[in-house]
Amino acid sequence: MKLIYTHENGFLVNNVKNIIEGHGIDVVLKNEFSSGAVGEVSAFDAWMELWVINDSDCERALDVISTMQSKADDPDWLCEQCAEENGASFDVCWNCQYEH
Ligand SMILES: [Zn+2]
């Protein structure tokens, strides 16, 4: 097993888990329940951790994460066809279906 992702925000970790599972990679969450407690949780050791079960899937899972993160950091883009603004995670213009 290998640790591939951890974050103080459990929603983010769950989101990453869902996406990676969508790629057919087996993962497991650790600290899933400790992060839900209010107040007493100390910083780093309570972060939720996402582990890949098969080491051979590790590289692929990291690829999925980096693709996801690079998309989230991209600026919005303007459609060349209708000049509408589109979020970075969309590959197709919401207005005219132009492919970015
Ligand atoms: Zn458009």
Image (cartoon, rainbow, N blue to C red):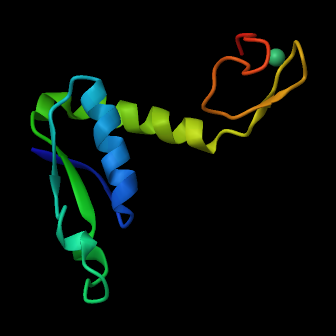
- When the figure is inspected, residue 3 is found, relative to residue 70, above or below; the finding is below
Rendered location of residue 95, percent (x, y): 78, 19
Seen from the viewer's position, the closer of residues 53 and 29 is: 29
The residue sitting at 33% across, 52% down in the picture is: 13
Ligand 1 falls in which quarter?
A: top right
Seen from the viewer's position, the closer of residues 11 and 77 is: 11
Rendered location of residue 76, percent (x, y): 75, 36
> Is 41 left, or right, of 98 in this rendering?
left
Rendered location of residue 42, percent (x, y): 27, 84
User: Residue 48 sits in which quadrant?
Assistant: bottom left
- When the figure is inspected, residue 4 is found, relative to residue 98, above or below; the finding is below
Q: How many marks?
A: 0
Seen from the viewer's position, the closer of residues 1 and 84 is: 84
- When the figure is inspected, residue 33 is found, relative to residue 62, above or below; the finding is below
Rendered location of residue 53, percent (x, y): 10, 38
Residue that protrudes farthest toward the front in the picture:
95
- When the figure is inspected, residue 12 is found, relative to residue 19, above or below; the finding is below
The residue sitting at 86% across, 16% down in the picture is: 80
User: Residue 24 sits in which quadrant?
Assistant: top left
The residue sitting at 37% across, 45% down in the picture is: 15
Q: Quadrant of the N terminus?
A: top left
Q: Quadrant of the C terminus?
A: top right
Residue that protrudes farthest toward the bottom in the picture:
40
